[in-house]
Image (cartoon, helix red, strand yellow):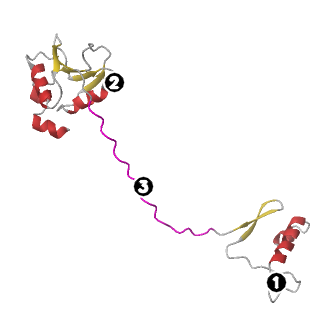
Amino acid sequence: EDALRLDPEQRRARENLETAKARIPAPASAPAAGVARIAPAPGVRLIEVAPHVYELKLPPRPIAARPLPPLPQAEPPAPLPERRFRLEVSNGNGVPGLAARVSARLRAAGVAGARLTNQPPYRQAATEIQYREGYALEAERLAALLRQEVRLVASPRLRAATDVRLVLGHDAPTETALIAGPQHVALAH
């Protein structure tokens, strides 16, 4: 009816009105013109969205809030099996016997025996861990056993018999300064 009032020549609006009237029974007290007038529901509006195009806008329906099911808890990934690697402990600070003492402490912490070397002229300022490609995880695990932070360096120049190399620097004058005793190392795992 509103569409026809706005544009009486709207043939489709007239057809739709006739179809609606045929489907809806007339109330007991129909208007004088014989046209049944339907009261819109509260909040319903007729909106012209384009010339001669109308749309009924319904009020938004309230949405009943329901709690969401809990998210599934992801299981922590299985720890990777520890792979054996060939370790070299190299004395880069010149303290006699330091590489052997560090190797002994590492053995007590569960790290397999190491090849011992010297790195003259003993000018290594900071202790570092060098590792071959594919052995970064092992280098990180070795670094976790140390009391101080050390730099991890990927090195393509390690000898063929070495996967990970611990180079002792002047920042580690003793094995106890570098590695905790066995009882403390066990807690670090």
Q: Position of residue 149 (x, y in %)?
A: 22, 30
Disc nearest the viewer among 1 and 2: 2
Q: Position of residue 147 (x, y in %)?
A: 17, 32
Looking at the rendered structure, the kind of residue marked 2 is Gly
Per the image, the residue denoted by label 3 is 71
Report if residue 75 lies within the magenta region.
yes
Q: Are marks 1 and 3 in contact (CB under 8 Å)?
A: no
Q: What range is drawn magenta here?
A: 60-82
Q: Position of residue 158 (x, y in %)?
A: 27, 15
Label 2 residue SS: loop
Q: Compare residues 85 and 38 and report the one nearer the observer.
A: 85
Which quadrant is home to the C terminus?
top left
Q: Determine crowd level at label 2: few under 14, some 14-19, many 20+ residues with C-alpha closer than 10 A.
A: few
Per the rendering, the mark at residue 26 is 1
Q: Residue at x 68, y 69 (%)?
A: 58
Considering every residue shown, the one lying at the far bottom of the view is 29
Marks 1 and 3, how far apart in space?
54 Å
Q: Residue at x 15, y 36 (%)?
A: 185
Label 1 residue SS: loop
Per the image, the residue denoted by label 2 is 134
Which quadrant is home to the N terminus?
bottom right
Q: Is residue 166 above or below residue 141?
A: above
